[in-house]
Every structure is written in structure tokens, then in C-alpha cells.
Image: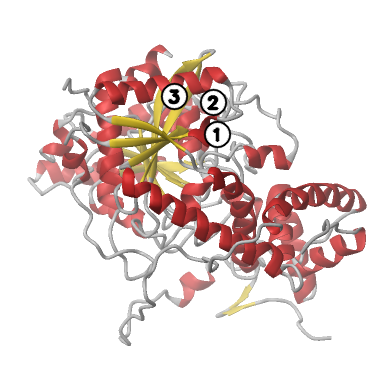
């Protein structure tokens, strides 16, 4: 809880990898500086002691499911319209394993 | 009460009658206006053919005696993160530079159903992440009153397209102030509805628990009319409320006498005295017409900004994970699966978007989630509860919309400094409340606005106050006189 959170260069690279973003050396330096400045500001919240339940959504709506009825859906052509690369009726994503 | 003319005449929506001008002629005039003001960079895509086609269809409908909709002949600009079938929707990002949606957002369907004419897609901060429209891949939108300054953001293009007179209505989206901020910086009206009042189906998500689409216009009644059209439950967005929207246009004209306004003291601290003085003057006008006014304290408000950014970034990191270049974007990239994704995202996202994805990933990661994200969610609960307590005693709460005047393009370089500009607006989104930004005058020839915050689903009170104030001040004229 207490203590400052400071992100190292290695951590910048680690989290960037999780984000699937690659960074140049100059990017790493700039991002590290910005992120540490912003995290310091976020610390004002981190150090608060609050005895209330967290709120992720404001609406108190109960979860509703639509009826299990067939509904209109997009055509195959439409679904593939914005694909980076396609092969007839498939998205092409590049080799996943190996 | 003196009735102020709206930009297209009160009759057109009271009697649902068509604007007397030929819709096709009107589209041509608007296209000329857009061309004349192209330097302001309000539009990313102008849909000349689509707008002319809609206008022709409407003209035919009128000629053959068909029933026309509530927006018949009105020109609408749509923020470029709201899906329009067959019309490029970029989110002002290189990532979606060539993305053409295959379906309409619910709000777009509704506008079309009411015979509104969509003329184009407006510029914005990339993925709505910014407060000035400077992060757009397509370059910044310029302020209507001073072209060297920012338009505000992220719905900057929508606000400027209204200020220039190119359109009568515009859609924006508001996650932490993105409708109210540019409305304030260009002296137009912008309303962020209650969370769940308007369907988000077809809005390209930034932070789903905070995002809300809303209306913008030069005057209150037009804002009310657009809200009327886009409000309501939607089976495709299960966070929408099924409660029936009232007739906002009629309700807006109901008078503001007797309404109780609380002035949030903290909203006026540490800001330019000239700005506070203008906003106090505007509140004085409301007092004069019979509202009661009292100062209140909301000490916890100061935590809303860091809590907002933690939550918004967390949600953004999750929402933007879908942009892998495989399903959208339409650009062929070589390499294996992961290489393609990394390349697409590294080249496709701008700096601010990357920073937010990064920080969002960080605050949600094991070891930090409790300290940052969950803590921010607790702050959110407290802000929400404190607002609810205030609404026991007040019908609306008042602050300035923006703590500063529009800054020069490029003037703010620190990301944190930019985030601070949202100080007045973000608490509203955390609590899911409605709020409106109303023009309040000028300081050093630049616009200043009053923000009025309402209780959940009470957009009516905000519209009443805005309309009564508009009738007193005639603020729509300020776009011509400055």
C-alpha cells in the first residue's frame, strides 16, 4: 500500500509486451518518464482508506438475457469486409504455433 | 419569457413540419460551408453522395405527401467513433483509416428513421482519448473563435461543425467530458445524458462503463430534440434503461422558476478569476429568473480525476485489445500471428492511445489491481454517493465546464497536464449523471461555459435551466458576434 510505485525500464518492456506494442529505445525512455509521473499522481487514490464497496458500473440493472430466438445476423461477406487478409470465407491471421 | 428562435425555427419540431428550404439545396449550401471552413479540419469524411441521396429521398417523400420524421431536413454531423453503415468510421486513428462499418449504430438508425440528413463524420481525439482533438491521426481541429487554438475534445469536430453553421445538430460521445469540453470551447450546447439513457450499440468503445453518446447543437431546443430522438432502451445494449424518455422539447420550455441550484465550491478553486466571474454571472442570471442558489462543498471531488483516469485506462486496455489487424483495419501485414499483431498495433495506434493501453494494463496487473483499479472503483462509489446526497437538496449542481480558456495548439506537452484539464467534467461520468454545458460569455474573446449537473435520468431539469438561460441571454447570437 505505502511507498511509491516506480516502473523500471525492464518493466516498461514487460508491460509493452503484454500490450502487444513494440517500443524503440527513445519510446521506452519517454514512456517510462510519463508513466512514473502519472503513477505518482495516481498515488493520491492509492493511499486512501475507504470503507465502501467498489463500484464498477453505475446502473443497478440486473443482468438480462435476450430471448433464445434466432435474430438477424451479418452475412459472411460483411463479416469479412474489413479483414486484414482473407481466404474465401476465412480470416488469415498468420502462423500461430512454432 | 422571451422566446429565442432556434437555428432552424421553433415550429419545425413543435409541429414536426419541415424546414421550408429545399433539402437538396440545403445540403449543397452546407457542403459549400464545409468547403469554406475546411481549414478548421472539423470533418474527417464528408458524405456528399449519401447526404444528397437522403435529401432527394426526403424531397420525394414531401412531394408525394409522405409522413416526414421529426428531424426532416435537419443536417447532422456524426462523431467518427459512431458506426455508419457503408461510411468510413476511423475513430481518428490510423488503425481504422480504412474501416467501413457494415451496420449502423442505433443512434444513427434513429436519426435516419426521423429523416435527419447525415452529412459527414467529425474529427476527434484518437479513439476519443484526449481533451483537445490534437491526438487525431488526421490533424487537430481548430477553435472556431481563434484558429490557432484547440477546439477542445474529444468531440472537437462536432462542436466546430455546429459553430460554423454547417450543420444544425451533431452527435458526440462523452467518457470524461468529451461532449461538454468542446461545446464549451466553441460556445455551443452539449449534453452528456445519464448513463443508460442512450444506446451505445455501434459506438466504438473506449471505456464502456463511462462512455455515453449525446446531442450537441447551437441552442437548447435543438439539443432537446436530438436527445428525444436518440434516447430510449435498446435490446442491443443491455445497459440502456427501458424507462420511457419524456418529451424533452416541451419539457425544456416548462420554466426554471423555483429550481434549486447548488454551486460546487471546489469547482471554482484554483481557476482563473475571470472565468469564475463569468460563470458566477451566468448563475446570477438563473437566480434572477427565480432559481434558488446556494454554495455547497464537495471535498471528495478532487479524487475524481485520478480515479477516472485509472478506470478509463483499465477499460481502454481491455476494449482496445480487439484491434489486432486481423478482423478490422483492412491492411495486409506479413509475419506470424504475434508479429502481425504487434506490428499492426505499434504502427496503428498513436502515442496517447498506447500510453493509456499501457497504464491500463499496468493498473489491472497482478499486484497492482487492488491498489489502483479497485481503489479507484471505491472512490467511484463514494463520488456517486456524495452526489446522491447533494441531490436530496438540489435539482442541479453548477461548476464551470472548463477550468481554463482554449489553449494554443501544441501548448500542452505533458500528458498529466492535459489530464488535469478534465477536472470539472469527469466526476459526472464516474457517477453516471447527466450534465449540460451552456455558453456563459467570453473572456479575452474566448468562450467560457457553465456546466449544470443533474440527477440520474433528470435531463429535463438541465434543459429547463439551459432554455430559460438562453431566453434571457440569447447566447446563440454570440456565435456571430463573439
B130 vs B209, nearest the viewer = B209
Left or right placement of residue B274 versus residue B395 in this view: right
Residue B343 appears in the rendering: yes
SS of the residue at dot 1? loop
Q: Earlier in the sequence, mark 1 or mark 2?
A: 2
Q: Which residue is mark 2?
A: B143
Marked residue chain, label 2: B
Q: Residue at x 16, y 22 (%)?
A: B1
What residue do we see at 9% from left, 46% from top? B64
Q: Chain of mark 3?
A: B
The residue carrying pointer 2 sits among few (fewer than 14), some (14 to 19) or many (20 or more) residues within 10 Å by Cα, namely: many
- Asked if disc 1 and disc 3 are in contact, CB closer than 8 Å, the reply is no
Residue B264's place in the image compared with B482, above or below, is: below
Is any atom of residue B205 visible in this view? no
Q: Foreground: B179 or B284?
A: B284
Camera-side mark, 1 or 3: 3
Quadrant into which the C terminus of chain B falls:
top left
SS at mark 3 in the image: helix
The residue nearer to you, when weighing B211 against B34, is B211
Asked if marks 1 and 2 touch (Cβ < 8 Å), the reply is yes
Mark 2 or 3, nearer chain start: 2
Percent of width and height locating residue B99: 55, 57
Q: Which residue is mark 1?
A: B152
> Which residue is rendered at x = 63% and y = 26% of the image?
B407
In this picture, is B279 found above or below B451?
A: above
CA–CA distance in space, label 2 to label 3: 20 Å
| Labels 1 and 3 positioned on one and the same chain | yes
**Label 3 sits on residue:** B279
**Percent of width and height locating residue B455:** 34, 49
Pinpoint residue B273: horizontal percent, then vertical percent: 55, 19
For this view, does B281 lie left or right of residue B211?
left
Amino acid at each position: 500500500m505505502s511507498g511509491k510505485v516506480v516502473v523500471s525500464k525492464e518493466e516498461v518492456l514487460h508491460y509493452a509486451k503484454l500490450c502487444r506494442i513494440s517500443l524503440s529505445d527513445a519510446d521506452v525512455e519517454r514512456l517510462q518518464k510519463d508513466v512514473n509521473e502519472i503513477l505518482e499522481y495516481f498515488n493520491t487514490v492509492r493511499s486512501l482508506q475507504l470503507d465502501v464497496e467498489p463500484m464498477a458500473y453505475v446502473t443497478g440493472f440486473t443482468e438480462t438475457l435476450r430471448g433464445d430466438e434466432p435474430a438477424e445476423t451479418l452475412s459472411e461477406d460483411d463479416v469479412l469486409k474489413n479483414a486484414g487478409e482473407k481466404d474465401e470465407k476465412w480470416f488469415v491471421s498468420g502462423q500461430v504455433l512454432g | 419569457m422571451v422566446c429565442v428562435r432556434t437555428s432552424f425555427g421553433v415550429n419545425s419540431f413543435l409541429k414536426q413540419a419541415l424546414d421550408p428550404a429545399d433539402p437538396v439545396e440545403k445540403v449543397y449550401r452546407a457542403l459549400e460551408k464545409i468547403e469554406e471552413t475546411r481549414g478548421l479540419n472539423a470533418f474527417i469524411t464528408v458524405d456528399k453522395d449519401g447526404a444528397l441521396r437522403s435529401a432527394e429521398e426526403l424531397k420525394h417523400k414531401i412531394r408525394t405527401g409522405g409522413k416526414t420524421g421529426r428531424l426532416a431536413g435537419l443536417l447532422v454531423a456524426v462523431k467518427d467513433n459512431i458506426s455508419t453503415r457503408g461510411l468510413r468510421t476511423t475513430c481518428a486513428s490510423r488503425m481504422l483509416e480504412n474501416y467501413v462499418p457494415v451496420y449502423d449504430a442505433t443512434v444513427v438508425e434513429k436519426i435516419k428513421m426521423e429523416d435527419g440528413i447525415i452529412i459527414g463524420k467529425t474529427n476527434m481525439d484518437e479513439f476519443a482519448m484526449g481533451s483537445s482533438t490534437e491526438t487525431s491521426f488526421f490533424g487537430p481541429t481548430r477553435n472556431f473563435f481563434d484558429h490557432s487554438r484547440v477546439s477542445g475534445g474529444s468531440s472537437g469536430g462536432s462542436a466546430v461543425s455546429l459553430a460554423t453553421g454547417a450543420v444544425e445538430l451533431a452527435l458526440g460521445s462523452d467518457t470524461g467530458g468529451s461532449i461538454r469540453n468542446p461545446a464549451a470551447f466553441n460556445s455551443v450546447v452539449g449534453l452528456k445524458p445519464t448513463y443508460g439513457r442512450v444506446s451505445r450499440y455501434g459506438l466504438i468503445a473506449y471505456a464502456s462503463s463511462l462512455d455515453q453518446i449525446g446531442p450537441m447543437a447551437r441552442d437548447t431546443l435543438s439539443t432537446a430534440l436530438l436527445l428525444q430522438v436518440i434516447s430510449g432502451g435498446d435490446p442491443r445494449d443491455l445497459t440502456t434503461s427501458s424507462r420511457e424518455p419524456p418529451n424533452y422539447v416541451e419539457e425544456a420550455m416548462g420554466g426554471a422558476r423555483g429550481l434549486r441550484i447548488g454551486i460546487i465550491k471546489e469547482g471554482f478553486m484554483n481557476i482563473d478569476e475571470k472565468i469564475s466571474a463569468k460563470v458566477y454571472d451566468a448563475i446570477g442570471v438563473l437566480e434572477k429568473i427565480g432559481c434558488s442558489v446556494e454554495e455547497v462543498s464537495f471535498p471528495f471531488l478532487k479524487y475524481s480525476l485520478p480515479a477516472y483516469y485509472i478506470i478509463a485506462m483499465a477499460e481502454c486496455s481491455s476494449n482496445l485489445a480487439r484491434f489486432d489487424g486481423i478482423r478490422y483495419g483492412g491492411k495486409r501485414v506479413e509475419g506470424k500471428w504475434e508479429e502481425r499483431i504487434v506490428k499492426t498495433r505499434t504502427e496503428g495506434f498513436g502515442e496517447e492511445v498506447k500510453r493509456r493501453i499501457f497504464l491500463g494494463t499496468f493498473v489491472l496487473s497482478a499486484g497492482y489491481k487492488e491498489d489502483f483499479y479497485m481503489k479507484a472503483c471505491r472512490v467511484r462509489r463514494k463520488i456517486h454517493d456524495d452526489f446522491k446526497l447533494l441531490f436530496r437538496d438540489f435539482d442541479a449542481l453548477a461548476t464551470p465546464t472548463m477550468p481554463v480558456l482554449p489553449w494554443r495548439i501544441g501548448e500542452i506537452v505533458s500528458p498529466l497536464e492535459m489530464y488535469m484539464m478534465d477536472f470539472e467534467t469527469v466526476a459526472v461520468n464516474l457517477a453516471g449523471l447527466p450534465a449540460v454545458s451552456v455558453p456563459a460569455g467570453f473572456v479575452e474573446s474566448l468562450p467560457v461555459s457553465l456546466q449544470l449537473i443533474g440527477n440520474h435520468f433528470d435531463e429535463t431539469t438541465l434543459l429547463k435551466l439551459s432554455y430559460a438561460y438562453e431566453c434571457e441571454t440569447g447566447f446563440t447570437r454570440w456565435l456571430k458576434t463573439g
